[in-house]
Image: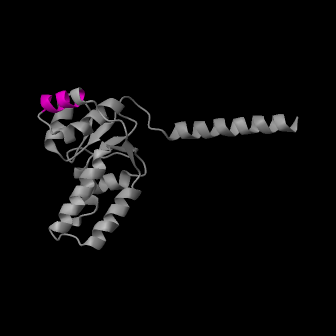
Amino acid sequence: MVKEVKEVTEVKEVEKAREARKAKEPQGGPASAGWVIDASVTMPWFFADEATPFTEGLLDALGSQAMWAPTLWVLECTNVLQSAQRRRRIDATRRAEIASELSALPVRLDLEIPDFVSLDRLAAAHALSAYDAAYLELALRRSLILVSLDQRLIAAASALGHPVLSADSEIRN
């Protein structure tokens, strides 16, 4: 009898936790489950001369929005850091600090790799690099809002009628 009561209590606790999570999940139509961010909006968080009210607003929204990126984002951000050190914008110590800070960001990396044909078609149809097309493909596939400063990428998403958050948009948490 005690064991049964304990099991019922545990089930109720699990149900309560699920309800609490559901209440916190964004509600609404398509693209309400989070954002896809690219390096153009990420790296200004670490370079004061590139920061804007828009990029700072995104940084403030980190805790309230699920942010996604293709695994390519790791390569792009690392490349920016390497380039910044070569150009003497930062030293090796700061480069390593930023890499650690990037690693700690609550950005969900999408591990699904787009197929060649689909990615090629998307890139060709919108005159995008394969890299930019990967961000758009992720946003489309997961029905997430695309967040970027890249005008060509923004234009491609807009042409497809996909929601975009850019410097011309207002950030709402």
Residue that appears at 80% across and 39% down = 6
Q: In x, y percent, where is residue 78?
A: 26, 57
Which image quadrant for residue 119?
Answer: top left
Q: Is residue 104 above or below residue 28?
A: below
Instruction: Give whichever of 15, 136 is nearer the camera.
Output: 136
Q: Is residue 118 above or below residue 168?
A: above
Q: Identify the coloring.
A: one colour
Q: Is residue 129 above or below residue 45?
A: above
Q: In x, y percent, where is residue 93?
A: 30, 73
Q: Quadrant of the N terminus?
A: top right
Instruction: Give whichever of 26, 131 is nearer the camera.
Output: 131
Q: Is residue 89 above or below residue 110?
A: below
- Farthest-out residue, front: 116
Residue that appears at 65% across and 35% down = 15
Predominant secondary structure in magenta? helix
Magenta range: 118-126
Residue 124 is one of the magenta-drawn residues:
yes
Q: In x, y percent, where is residue 57?
A: 31, 54
Which image quadrant for residue 9?
Answer: top right
